[in-house]
Image (tube, rainbow, N blue to C red):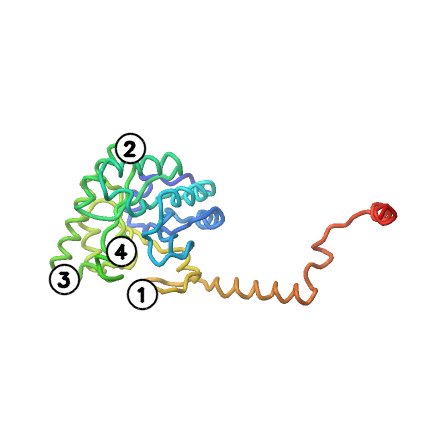
Amino acid sequence: MPDKITLHDLNALREQGQPITMITAYDYPSALLVDAAGIEMILVGDSLGMVVHGFTTTLPVTLDMMILHSQAVMRAVEHAYVVGDMPFGTYQISIEEAKRSAVRFVAEAGVDAVKLEGGETMAETVRAIVSMGVAVQGHIGLTPQSVGAFGGMKVQGKDIDRARQLVRDAIALEESGAFSMVLEAVPARLADLITRTVSIPTIGIGAGAGCSGQVLVMHDVLNLFDRFTPKFVKKYANVSAVMTDAFAQYRDDVRGGQFPAAEHTFSIHDDVMETLEVGR
């Protein structure tokens, strides 16, 4: 297994033109598998609110929830660079509260960096968190915590004014000290322009191949979440079908008396049983 990934490694990959891979993980067993696969970055995303806890949006996710899931992930990871999502309400109200939240996240969960949504409007907040020695990943384009303001899960930056704003957002994040940024649901040519404009890695999700790297939600990759499937998702396995079939086979084996079989049970000496029977 390679050494622990660092920011230097991520920047080197970008400079070499080697795409960076990132995927979400929310617990110990999934993080073990993602790490073993050689993925460079793991995102403990607030998407766990939807794919793990069943909320309809990410908004109900709390910092306590994020810390708990991140702690489990960090126990598993030896290689990947782990980023924890700052949930809604933990950094928007004030810079001081954002700093407290970020410090708590890193101190209690042990994540390598935190991620927050927003561009120019969050630049001072990013700068303040970075000034404390906490690495920050930005997130622009479609920002799920603001989905209500966007009127739904819509592609961002298709008109000239919004496209220019996204370029300004990206520059502001770089200037504020962010080590990278996620570009979500951004037209591919615009994401490519942003990637060429800034000198930090861009991680795309629905933003085309011109980004420095790509991120997907684990449950989408494995087809474990079927409430909706964004256009940008590629399903690499149908794990939900495999799991459902396994559960059904278990049910049938139990009902039919095939499980547990002799090889699944423990033995006891005959004399012990004879003594028990006599003593009844």
Q: First in sequence, mark 3 or 1: give its number.
A: 3
Q: CA distance from mark 1 to mark 4?
A: 12 Å
Label 3, on which residue? 159
- Would you say the residues marked 4 and 2 are in contact, meaning their CB atoms lie under 8 Å apart? no
- Residue lying at the far front of the rendered structure: 280
Q: Position of residue 180 (x, y in %)?
A: 26, 45
Q: First in sequence, mark 4 or 2: give its number.
A: 2
Q: CA distance from mark 2 to mark 1?
A: 37 Å
Neighbours of disc 4 within 10 Å: few (<14), some (14-19), many (20+): many
- Taking the spot 24% from the left edge, 58% from the top edge, the residue there is 148
Q: Secondary structure at mark 3?
A: loop
Label 1, on which residue? 231
Label 4, on which residue? 184
Q: First in sequence, mark 1 or 4: give its number.
A: 4
Q: Residue 133, labelled with which disc? A: 2
- Taking the spot 31% from the left edge, 62% from the top edge, the residue there is 232
- Taking the spot 35% from the left edge, 64% from the top edge, the residue there is 229
What amino acid does circle 2 point to? Gly
Residue 189 vs residue 100: left or right?
left
Q: Is residue 15 visible?
A: no
Q: Position of residue 271 (x, y in %)?
A: 86, 46
Q: First in sequence, mark 2 or 3: give its number.
A: 2
